[in-house]
Image (cartoon, helix red, strand yellow):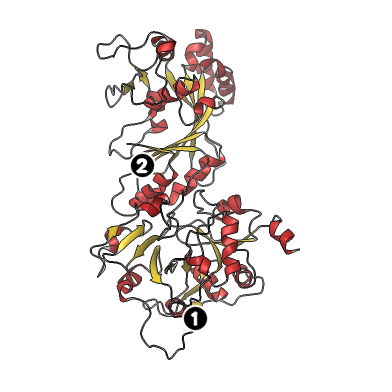
C-alpha cells in the first residue's frame, strides 16, 4: 500500500496566503523571537501547511524573498528524502535549513544529548555575528559546525561536517517555520537543473503531481538565491554568489579579506560540494542557451548569428543541433543593458565577395569547411551602425545565394499571454515582404493601412500569405529585462522559463559586468545555464 501511494500522482493545491499582519520579531534588533501577529483558524493555509510539514514526508512549496523554496522538516530523514524525490535531486548535494529566529538556531548548534547546564557560551560563532546583524533576515546563508550527535537529519548535510542556514526576509516563511516548530530544509522549489521558481505558477509547472501544497505569496523580490559564506576558514570565503554582494560582506568586521571560492572543483563536480547548489548543472532551460559576456558596448549579435542560423539550416554548419531542427525555428532573445531591438538581427548586411579585404574562398561545395567550427569566419564589423559579416569558409555559390537576399524582421502584434513580461514577437525573414509584391498591391496595402490603422488584421492577413515564399527563418521572442541589475536579477529565471514554455529552440542572452551589487550572482547563474559562452 505504501509503495503504491509513493508512486501515485499527487493532487497539487495552490493556496493563497494573506501576508498582511502575519508576524513580527519581538525585538527587531536582536532577532531572538518571531511572534505570530494573528489568530489562525483551522482552515488557515499557513496552519494547514505547518501541520502537513509536521506529519508528512511530502514537502511544501512556499515563497521567500529570493526564490520559492521546497520545504520539509529538517529533523526527519523521511521528510528530507521527500525533497530529493520531488526535485529529482542527487542526495549528495547538501541543503540549506531555514530558521525563524536565533532562539531556534541555537537549539541546533548544540549536540542532541546536551543538557541546558552543559555550557552558557553562545554557540553562534563570533565571526558570524556582524553578518547576522547586518544581513539577517535576508539572502545570506552561513556555514556552521554540525554538532555530534546532531538534531538534523543526516540527509541535510550530505555527509559534511557543516550545515548551511539562513533566516529568510519573508514574514510568510518565518511564520510557517514558527508554526511548524522546526527548521525547514528548503532548496529552490523547481525540478532539478531547471530555472529557479520566482512565482507559485513556476512551482506548479515543475512539481505538479509531485507535491500536495504550494503557498502563494506573490512573486519573489530578489529573484536569485542567497549568498553562501564560510567564516570557519581563513580567510573567509564566498562559496556561492547571491543576493548579498562580496563588496558588502567585506564591509563587515572580520570579513575584510573575504575571497571568492565558487570556481573550485566542487563547482564542476570534482568533489563533494561545500555549499548547496554548487556541484551539478543548475538553472538550465530545455533550450540551448548562448550567453554573450558583456563587452560594455552596444554591439548587437544578430548579424553574425544570422550567418550561423542560415548555415545550420542549409547543413553547412553544426550549430547546437539546429542543423537537424524543423525550420523555421523559434529563437529567444533576453536583452539587458545594451542590446537593441531584435539584438540587431534585422540589421544584417553582407559584404561583397569582390571587396579587397575578402580572403580567397573555395569555389566548390566539396571544398567547403566542414569541421563545424566558426573560428575560420572572417568578421568584418563595418561601422557600429551597420556591422557587416561574411563567412570565408563556405563555397562562393552558397555565400552568394545567401547574401543576395536581405534579412528583415517583421514585427508581429504583441502577445498578452505573458503576465510577467512584455514579449516582443517578430518573424526573421530572408527577403523584404513588400519587394515580393507587385507595385499595385504595395500601394493598395499602404492605402489600406492608412485607412484602417485601428484594425490592421486585413493587412496582416494579406502579408502573411507571402511569408513562406520569403524564406521564413525563425520566429523571434524578445524579452527586455532593463538596465538595472536588480531588475535583471528579479526577472532572469522568469524570462528563461517564459521562453522555455514557448518551446524556443535557442536562447541568446546578453550578459552584464559581474562586479558589484548582485551582478556576480546573475552572471554565475547565467554561466551555469549556458550551453556555450561567447566572449
Return the residue nearer the eye: 344 or 394.
394
The residue that label 1 is drawn on is: 112
Q: Is residue 215 visible?
A: no
Quadrant location, the N terminus: bottom right
Taking the view exactly as shown, the residue that stands out farthest to the left is: 256
The residues tagged by marks 1 and 2 sit, at their Cα atoms, a distance apart of 47 Å
Residue at the (39%, 32%) spot, across then down: 343
Image x and y of residue 2, in percent: 72, 64
Query: Where does the image place residue 54, in percent across and percent down from the top left?
Result: 61, 73
Which circle marks residue 327 in the picture?
none
Please say if 174 is above or below 239.
below
76 in relation to 66, above or below: below
- Look at discs 1 and 2 and give the one toward the viewer: 1
- Closer to the N terminus: mark 1 or mark 2? 1
Q: Secondary structure at mark 2?
A: loop
Disc sitting over residue 511 in the figure? 2
Above or below residue 309? Residue 156 is below
Q: Position of residue 417 (x, y in %)?
A: 57, 41
- All told, the count of numbered labels is 2
User: Which residue sits at x=29%, y=21%?
Assistant: 380
* 147 sits left or right of 37 in the view: left
Image quarter where the C terminus lies is top left
Amino acid at each position: 500500500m505504501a509503495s503504491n501511494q509513493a508512486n501515485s500522482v499527487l493532487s497539487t493545491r495552490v493556496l493563497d496566503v494573506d501576508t498582511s499582519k502575519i508576524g513580527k520579531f519581538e525585538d527587531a534588533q536582536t532577532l531572538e523571537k518571531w511572534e505570530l501577529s494573528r489568530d489562525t483558524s483551522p482552515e488557515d493555509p499557513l496552519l494547514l501547511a505547518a501541520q502537513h510539514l509536521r506529519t508528512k514526508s511530502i514537502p511544501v512549496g512556499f515563497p521567500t524573498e529570493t526564490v520559492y523554496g521546497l520545504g520539509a522538516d529538517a529533523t526527519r530523514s523521511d521528510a528530507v528524502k521527500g525533497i530529493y524525490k520531488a526535485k529529482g535531486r542527487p542526495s549528495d548535494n547538501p541543503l540549506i535549513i531555514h530558521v525563524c529566529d536565533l532562539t531556534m538556531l541555537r537549539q541546533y548548534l548544540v549536540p542532541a544529548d546536551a543538557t541546558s547546564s552543559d555550557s552558557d557560551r553562545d554557540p553562534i560563532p563570533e565571526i558570524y555575528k556582524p553578518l547576522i546583524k547586518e544581513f539577517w533576515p535576508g539572502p545570506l546563508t552561513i556555514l556552521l559546525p554540525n554538532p555530534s550527535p546532531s538534531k538534523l537529519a543526516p540527509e541535510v548535510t550530505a555527509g559534511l561536517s557543516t550545515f548551511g542556514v539562513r533566516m529568510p526576509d519573508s514574514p510568510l516563511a518565518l511564520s510557517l517555520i514558527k508554526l511548524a516548530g522546526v527548521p525547514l530544509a528548503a532548496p529552490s522549489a523547481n525540478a532539478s537543473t531547471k530555472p529557479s521558481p520566482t512565482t507559485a505558477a513556476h512551482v506548479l509547472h515543475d512539481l505538479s503531481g509531485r507535491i500536495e501544497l504550494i503557498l502563494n505569496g506573490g512573486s519573489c523580490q530578489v529573484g536569485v538565491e542567497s549568498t553562501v559564506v564560510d567564516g570557519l576558514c581563513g580567510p573567509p570565503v564566498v562559496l556561492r554568489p547571491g543576493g548579498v554582494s562580496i563588496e558588502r560582506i567585506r564591509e563587515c568586521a572580520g570579513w575584510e579579506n573575504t575571497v571568492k571560492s565558487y570556481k573550485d572543483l566542487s563547482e564542476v563536480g570534482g568533489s563533494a560540494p561545500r555549499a548547496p547548489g554548487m556541484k551539478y548543472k543548475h538553472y538550465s532551460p530545455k533550450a540551448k542557451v548562448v550567453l554573450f559576456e558583456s563587452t560594455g558596448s552596444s554591439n548587437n549579435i544578430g548579424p553574425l548569428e544570422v550567418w550561423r542560423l542560415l548555415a545550420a539550416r542549409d547543413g553547412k554548419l553544426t550549430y547546437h543541433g539546429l542543423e537537424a531542427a524543423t525550420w523555421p525555428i523559434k529563437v529567444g532573445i533576453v536583452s539587458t543593458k545594451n542590446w537593441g531591438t531584435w539584438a540587431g538581427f534585422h540589421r544584417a548586411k553582407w559584404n561583397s565577395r569582390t571587396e579587397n579585404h575578402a580572403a580567397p574562398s573555395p569555389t566548390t561545395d566539396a571544398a567547403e569547411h566542414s569541421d563545424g567550427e566558426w573560428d575560420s569566419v572572417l568578421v568584418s564589423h563595418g561601422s557600429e551602425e551597420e556591422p557587416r559579416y561574411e563567412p570565408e569558409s563556405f563555397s562562393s555559390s552558397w555565400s552568394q545565394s545567401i547574401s543576395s537576399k536581405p534579412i528583415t524582421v517583421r514585427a508581429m502584434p504583441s502577445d498578452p499571454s505573458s503576465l510577467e513580461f512584455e514579449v516582443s514577437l517578430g518573424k526573421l525573414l530572408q527577403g523584404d515582404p513588400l519587394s515580393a509584391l507587385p507595385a499595385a498591391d504595395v500601394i493598395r496595402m499602404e492605402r489600406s493601412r492608412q485607412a484602417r490603422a485601428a484594425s490592421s488584421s486585413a493587412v496582416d492577413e494579406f502579408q502573411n500569405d507571402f511569408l513562406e515564399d520569403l524564406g521564413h527563418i525563425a520566429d523571434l521572442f524578445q524579452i527586455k529585462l532593463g538596465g538595472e541589475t536588480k531588475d535583471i536579477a528579479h526577472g532572469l529565471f522568469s524570462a528563461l522559463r517564459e521562453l522555455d514554455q514557448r518551446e524556443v529552440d535557442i536562447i541568446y542572452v546578453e550578459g552584464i559586468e559581474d562586479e558589484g551589487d548582485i551582478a556576480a550572482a546573475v552572471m554565475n547563474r547565467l554561466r551555469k545555464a549556458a550551453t556555450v559562452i561567447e566572449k
